[in-house]
Amino acid sequence: MEVISFRSGDRVQAQRVTQALVAAWLQSNAGSGTTVEVIDPPSDPTVPSYPNRPQIASVGTIGGLLFGFAAVRFRRPAVA
């Protein structure tokens, strides 16, 4: 089993390059006598895989709250 993959920030370019790679690979194996089948053709992603902004925001919020509580809990008492 062969896997052809390409990542790019531009989804149109990624799909175009992947299609070109698959076509070139199929053409190079055309005379080998083996059966070649594309199981999952390149498709447009429905959502970006990275960055996961809600996850980054929630981790930052929780981390900030924990740091704030720790700072309040372990601060030095005021000198009178």
Image (spheres, rainbow, N blue to C red):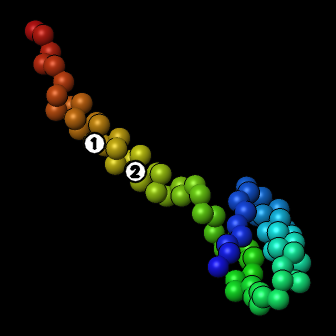
In the displayed structure image, the side of residue 37 where residue 48 appears, left or right: left
The residue at which mark 2 appears reads as 59
* Whether residue 23 is visible: no
| Residue 32 picture quarter | bottom right
User: Does residue 53 sit above or below 14 in this rendering?
Assistant: above
In contact (CB < 8 Å): disc 1 and disc 2:
no
Q: Residue furthest front?
A: 32
Q: Nearer the viewer, residue 78 or 38?
A: 38
The residue at which mark 1 appears reads as 66
Could you tell me residue 78's position as x and y percent? 15, 15
Q: Quadrant of the C terminus?
A: top left
Q: Nearer the viewer, residue 51 or 22?
A: 22
What SS does tag 2 mark? helix
> Is disc 1 surrounded by few (<14), some (14 to 19) or many (20+) residues within 10 Å?
few
| Residue 47 picture quarter | bottom right
Q: Nearer the viewer, residue 67 or 44?
A: 44
At a point 71% along the width and 70% down the height, the residue shown is 4
Count of numbered circles in the view:
2
* Inter-mark Cα distance, 1 to 2: 11 Å
Could you tell me residue 40's position as x and y percent? 70, 83
